[in-house]
Amino acid sequence: MADAPITVEQHLARVLEAITPLGHVQQPLMETLGLAAAESVTAGIALPSFDNSAMDGYAVRHADVADAGEESPVELPVVGEIGAGNAQLLTLPPGTAAKIMTGAPVPSGADCVVPYEWTDHGVARVRIERSPSPGQHVRVAGDDVSVGDLLIEEGTVLGPRHLGLLASVGRASVASRPRPRVVILSTGTELREPGQPLGHDSIYDGNSYLLAAAARRAGALAYRVGIVPDQPRAFLDALADQLVRADVVVTSGGVSMGDFDVVKEALRPLGTVWFGPVAMQPGKPQGFGTVGDDATPIFCLPGNPVSSYISFEMFVLPALRKMMGINPHSRPLVQARLTHAITSPPGRRQFLRGEYDAASGQATVTPVGGSGSHLVGDLAASDALIVVPEDTLSIGAGEPVQVIRLDEEF
């Protein structure tokens, strides 16, 4: 008797319950882009760390130039030049000016900066034709960040701006969970590598590229393994060779009910991998469990490319994000209105390919192609999945639907 299908939520819960976040380590800043911080970071220094000039010009005491104007310019002797990283003049005597560059420290005694444009650009003496207000064009120490300020909260997904801030306060590394190492195995005697000649009964292996790219986009390290033929021993040998570098294994193909479903045949006797139907279309046949001495999670996805990709989005992606400590685990659902009517079979959650458009201010989604799980061209032309509930048989044009946007960061 065939197993009764479980729901998408039940299978996802099974997956996430078995997944443990990877242990965090200190990593160089550039290695943490897109990862979640595993610590909160406070500022050990202020930004700016010293009063500095916001303009190229002359550092002065406001009292010495308060009456400067075009009709009554003030002339001051120039007693030095202060460059960023080359500041020799530490104190400005009364009644003098010092040439100063943007970012250079303002000397003690000076309280404002006169931009070049308000002067004659003098070298030994400078004529000032306009007076700045006290403090004008001076960036005060701590104006941006104070010592002890919370810069990064634990769990923050680190982007370029976060890394720039951390580097600016002198942090060379930050604690984060490493990128999961994902090994992708494609099974099928009929498969060929792109670039090789095809026989009359062979096809190119697109799945391993599709899944490896999806894993890489999720922030993981992806390792494509050569094509594995439909032989249980060959599959188990390939799997054993790869477990040493795998935090997760993803296979595609060999999980249905056929005579050559090598993945199911090879793994089912282990007793640690579940195989069964999930009430979804495409992607009904699924497998998940653990393999090897380290109980490495393994996802056994169906072989049709659309089924494989949607299964990755629904189950593998949330697992990878949990491993990396990134929330939320699953892509959010958004609402849009259908541009064309659709139908759906009862009892299964259908994921139709679609094109999302919010340019008009009202979000719409247009179905792309058919529902076949082999239609990889339609998949590539899509940027969204239209989610049709199990008990919904049809949805008319103009009606609201739930949509998963595939190319959005979240």
Image (tube, helix red, strand yellow):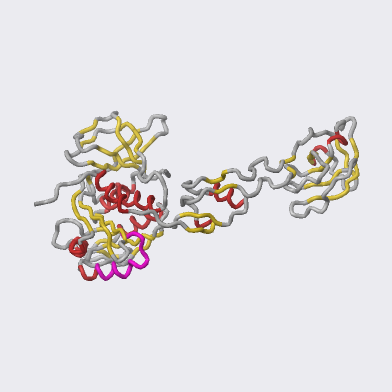
Find residue 60 and report its horizontal and vertical position in percent.
83, 40
Find residue 306 and report its horizontal and vertical position in percent.
27, 50
Q: Residue furthest left?
A: 1
Principal secondary structure, stretch drawn in magenta: helix
Q: Is residue 201 visible?
A: no
Please say whether residue 236 is one of the residues in the magenta stretch: yes
Residue at 42% across / 50% down in the picture? 325
Find residue 132 and report its horizontal and vertical position in percent.
80, 34
Residue at 84% across / 46% down in the picture? 98
Which quadrant would residue 151 be assigned to in this image?
top right
The quadrant the C terminus occupies is top left
Left-right relation of 296 to 3: right
Find residue 345 and report its horizontal and vertical position in percent.
17, 39
Q: Nearer the viewer, residue 283 or 153?
A: 153
Chain part drawn in magenta? 235-249
Left-right relation of 365 to 67: left
Left-right relation of 91 to 177: right
